[in-house]
Image: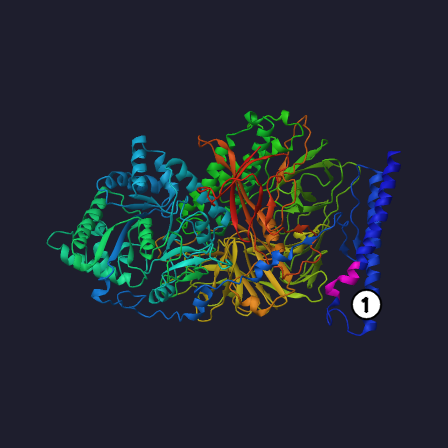
Amino acid sequence: MKLKKQVTVCGAAIFCVAVFSLYLMLDRVQHDPARHQSGGNFPRSQISVLQNRIEQLEQLLEENHEIISHIKDSVLELTAHADGQPAPPRRDNGSWALPPESRPSFLAVSPQDCQFALGAKGEGPDLQMLAVYSLLPFDNQDGGVWKQGFDITYEPNEWDTEPLQVFVVPHSHNDPGWIKTFDKYYYDQTQHILNSMVLKMQEDPRRRFIWSEISFFSKWWDNISAQKRAAVRRLVGNGQLEMVTGGWVMPDEANSHYFAMIDQLIEGHQWLEKNIGVTPRSGWAVDPFGYSSTMPYLLKRSNLTGMVIQRVHYAIKKHFAATQNLEFMWRQTWDPDSSTDIFCHMMPFYSYDVPHTCGPDPKICCQFDFKRLPGGRINCPWKVPPRAITEANVAERAQLLLDQYRKKSKLYRSKVLLVPLGDDFRYDKPQEWDAQFLNYQRIFDFLNAQPQLHVQAQFGTLSDYFDALYKKAGIVPGMRPPGFPVLSGDFFSYADREDHYWTGYYTSRPFYKSLDRVLEAHLRGAELLFSLALAHARHAGADSRYPLSDYSLLSSARRNLGLFQHHDAITGTAKEAVVVDYGVRLLHSLTNLKRVIINAAHYLVLGDKDTYRYDPATPFLSADGTRLNQDSLPERTVVKLDASPRFLVVFNPLEQERLSLVPLLVSSPHVRVLSEDGQPLPAQLSAHWSSATDAVPDVYQLSILARLPALGLRVLQLQKSFDGHTTPQSSVRLYLHGRDVTVRKQEAVPVQVFPAAPDDFCLESQHLRSCFSGSSGLLQSLRCAGEEREQRVSTEFFIYGTRTSKDKSGAYLFLPDGEAKPYTPKDPPIVRVTEGPLFSEVSSYYQHVQTVVRLYNVPGVEGLSLDVSCLVDIRDHVNKELAMRFSTNIESDDTFFTDLNGFQIQPRRYQQKLPLQANFYPMPTMAYIQDMQSRLTLHTAQALGVSSLGSGQLEVILDRRLMQDDNRGLGQGLKDNKRTCNRFRLLLERRSSANKVQDGRPVSFPSLLSHLTSMHLNAEALVLPVAQQPALPALRSFASLSTTLPCDFHILNLRTLQAEDDSLPSAEAALILHRKGFDCSLEAKNLGFNCTTSQGQLALGSLFQGLELGSLQPTSLTLMYPLGTASNSTNIQLHPMEIATFRIRLG
């Protein structure tokens, strides 16, 4: 009877689907705009149009017939043996046919949401950095004492009506790792600096000091007495000591991702609020090697009102100094009004050290660095030493210094002057405090007692300077001072002298740049799952059984990821031993985060939560991808199959449902995959290769097609099949290219071996057709389904050498010996072609690089782009850099686009007037080129340097091995290269409504598909096999969200906040949301995934399934300031591009 019912229901379903398909089919013929483009797909004459229509109808009928026969087959299959394995998809005309997607897909974007990318009506900025670059000659003329500037003159009476106000700001720049490790710096220097600071600042209330790195400060705080802590709070309270920026570190701004930038800022701010009760007001970033416009946005949203930057291209400094534009309101390129404006001060000279901060002449300024008094360990390179200030010489000395102050002040618009006084790890001995503070105080006392000089000089903090400037301008902090310019854009790439561009560090030590992102993805996943599991446990009253100790693992991982954002860590510019120290920290946290994820997933998938028992000795789940050492690539765990079923939990950290191929290794080819309720799932079985020609015996790669709930956990089961059912297998063709090598095959997976190289060949999926060169095995062209034209996308590898002159490339600098030369390996590649129903791929094995290009034959995001990975090993190279170049027919001219911190896109222009190395830029997540018809985006899972050196080209530097130091203080080359896996996605999109005016604007956005592709690449689904055990409790998939999130919303984090006891979680969490800006002009047909937008509106109250939102308080980005009052409404609205933080209580 039950079977009859099933057949009746299925029959009815077939009828409905048939009718609906015919309706859709007719609808498509009538309304498909692509089919109406004249001159596009068919001739204009009416008859041929009619003929075409008939052909289309026939084709659609055929498709429809195919769909119905598939459904029939499925129904028969299900009724015949309810627990059976799906029949292997058949091959049609040599390509694989997949069962059709059961759910309709749709893209519903409201027209209002498309307006944002089209641009604002507001007035443009006074200074647009793209335009400034086009304007400047970059001629590097000798400027005299200020070598990179010009001669500064002034009239002595210029300050008669308004005296010069000078703030000398003592600072000590402490790198959390560079030449020494973080701990070694702390024990050798930092603790002494801070100890002396407490002592010496109390000697005179006129003394001031600023500090920025909370990583060091918190370590020191943990080691000092309550009495000393009270003294620090007093110094902060009375304005003598200021915490500037207040992040965990002073982050690199080129390679860091905005998740990690925000996270280290929150970590520092939360620490300050909890321990000292202070909120930073001013930003201080004197050492990052170039500046991203993401940072001013984050500081502004954290309620800071002013910021200082220093390492900017010397030609831009000179230009801004000449036009008095060194201070400006920094505005986001996409900001329609001025809500993102923040006041920014750019230092004018070569460095932040004392010789380059008092004025234009370093020979004079050095004489006022009293650490260099004769008899000390350091002196002045200009051969004129400082002299201690006495009554006899104070008049002459003060006059000499005042002349420098006045000259420097002529470069700025206000009569308030900022003079930093410090350098790396300064003030570590009491003698230095005395030398600097006593001598300067004598000068100040003299200057301030001479009214005819019209100067008032004093020690100050950064905010003392900004406050005085705002007061002079008659405005409140944060407002735009009258007459000051507005600037938009960024400050990459940086050169400090000649043609020494700091563009090498965009790629240096790519292994760790990749590990950074793996840790970041795990941290985000762990934060989300921990917060959800804890909320559900509290809701069920089971929190006493939940491992709250996991919170301290989270906390330590935040700090280790934060530490690595430092501008000598993620940049790859530290000593080898320091790099190892960072690596050990990253790996330690990665291991701990897997534990946090496992514990949370365990609780959330249990059908009966009462059975939950936390046992650290025997974890319920295990994690895939173990790393033996900090410099090892991950190794996948093999799931052992036997008579009893094995269960897997798959975690999708994205806030969108995804249809993904879940890869794992199994011990038997006889396997079938079922959902938790016993329904068979499509899968593909492949060999597992340890090299080009060696298949690992008794290990198989199983790729399962599974629909994963948004921000959820899916339970799958594996069964060893004994009844002859087999999972569809890949077929493999191995081309040896004339090389004499032994091939080790597996019996279960067919491999055909060909001694020669193949002809050019193509692979096809339902979305893409990609063609490859037979001789190189590398990608040559790409065509999207439904397109007539192949797009040439030829891939080649190139090698850059370095100069023969004394200045050579190193960890920081890229100084190539001319254009790149083609990579010529000593042996031709071995090419392995794998084809199967769910994915097909081409692997090319060269001596120094193995590439894999994979097509996913699945509906939705995964199948719409090419997966490209490069395993790079250049450990036998000498002074070489390996680049991968894509060449296309796209008429991009000199324009290309790179992202800043994964947050926004910055248009770039190839500048012919600049050397080749100046045209490289950071690429943390993507770069693209486009013309009126197409856009090609290279998505990346790790930060690397990128450029477009010719029209239609995109080029990325994969690794660099350099044998010498580049004279920037490191004292080492880059010789510790690792085997590194670089992962990419290549996305080709058709542009439907491009126009020249639009493309000329200094702002651009990815499409929604591009955003989602980037997320898929950067937040992979995590496979958690359930440990083998005799009696397994009932498991249920877990969906955390009760509604689908609009697809322009991203949950950046759900970060449980700490309780009074640092190591324990509180009941509150920070929910950080980002609404992405996107471009609607890229065609979105047949995307195969669901996507809607909502004009920025979101109902948070009902968002988390099974949980109530106890409270909701909008706050500043780092939770330091409440924004407005907490209202009862839980509906929020976000503008495009905005990041918003909410303090919430879930339960």
Quarter containing the N terminus: top right
Q: Amino acid at mark 1?
A: Asn
Q: Residue at x 36, y 40 (%)?
A: 217
| Res 1033 quadrant in image | top right
Front-most of 1070 and 969?
1070
Q: Is residue 29 magenta?
A: yes
Q: Residue at the location (61% across, 49% down)?
A: 1016
State whether residue 120 appears in this view.
yes
Relative side of 412 to 716, left or right = left
Q: Quadrant of residue 140?
A: bottom left
Q: Please state the horizontal and vertical placement of residue 796, each as a whole percent of the image.
A: 57, 63
Element carrying mark 1? helix
* Residue, far left: 392
Magenta span contains residue 192 = no
Q: Which residue is mark 1?
A: 52
**Model colouring:** rainbow
Q: Nearer the viewer, residue 482 or 129?
A: 482
Q: Which residues are magenta?
A: 27-35
Q: Is residue 28 above or below residue 673?
A: below
> Percent from the top left, x then y, of residue 660?
67, 47
Q: Position of residue 1020 (x, y in %)?
A: 60, 46
| Residue at 41% over, 65% down | 803
Quadrant, the C terminus: top right
What kind of secondary structure does the magenta stretch mostly adopt? helix
Q: Residues within 10 Å of mark 1 (few under 14, many from 20)?
A: some
The residue lying toward the viewer, choosing from 89 and 527, is 527
Residue 1009: horizontal and vertical position, in percent? 63, 55
Give the side of residue 465 with respect to residue 403, left or right.
right
Q: Nearer the viewer, residue 168 or 1103?
A: 1103
Residue 917 seen in the figure: no
